[in-house]
Image: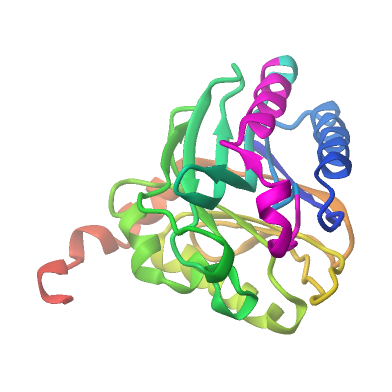
Amino acid sequence: MKISLLQLDIAFGNPQVNYAAAERKIREAAAQGTDCVVLPELWTTGYDLTRLVDIADPEGKATKALMSGLARELGIHIVAGSVASKKDNGITNSMYVFSRTGAIAGEYSKLHLFRLMDEHLYLHPGEAKGLFTLNGTSCAGLICYDIRFPEWVRAHTALGAEVLFISAEWPLPRLAHWRALLISRAIENQCYVVACNRTGKDPANTFAGHSMIIDPWGEVVCEASENEEILSGEIDVHKVREVRAQIPVFSDRRPELYL
């Protein structure tokens, strides 16, 4: 499967500009023969948290309509990053996944809110796992800060997830952490890690870029620069099964003693 990560420079607090930019990039990736497109975290608004009440997408409806239509028209899967979704119980940081038919394949709201960027003041945390199936493969969606919680990642791979899709707005000062954590999650879970970060700046942060695809051995398949770009790479889920058979981490686990 060819996967394309859209490492975008997000227009701060301007959903209409960001929707148009994302559509252009999705069409560009599709023209290059991709099977699946992945977007970064909060790509419709950026971290304009103080105005989310006004600019968040009610129930994710605008995002779903655009992404579903593009997936169906272009015949590609879309892991539509995450957007601020306004719901009855608050605003969530929610990822939506679409199959090439345009159907919703999965939905996940960020479980771990990042206090250093004030997420807990404006966002409501998710309460469910991010498992979904795409192209017959068991996958999971995670968002940014989630990768610092290996037990949360393992909760998905222990249930069979073979590909982890991660959307992020990861700051440049912690680039070394980004790379180390992603590679570690791939090695310890013997899975592909497909991680799409944003690039550029907002009023408070400079972002790292360096979107990556990592294989089940922890080898980097491809890695972006710090600039806006479309990063594409191939994954083969048969490699996940080969690695897990060679080093049987999952059957050797003793979870009854871990707590």
As drawn, the residue found furthest toward the left would be 256
In the image, is 164 to the left or to the right of 36?
left
> Residue at left 66%, top 52%?
53
* Figure check: 78 above or below 191: above
User: In the shown orientation, is residue 210 left or right of residue 144?
Assistant: right
Foreground of the two, 65 or 198: 65
Number of numbered discs: 0
Q: Quadrant of the C terminus?
A: bottom left
**Direction from residue 93 to residue 237 in the image, left or right:** left
**Image spot of residue 22 (x, y percent):** 82, 39
Determine which quarter of the picture holds residue 121. Answer: bottom right
Residue 103 in picture, x, y percent from top left: 54, 21
> Would residue 54 be counted in the magenta stretch?
yes
Q: Nearer the viewer, residue 84 or 80?
A: 84
Q: Main secondary structure of the magenta part?
A: helix
Q: Is residue 53 above or below residue 80?
A: below
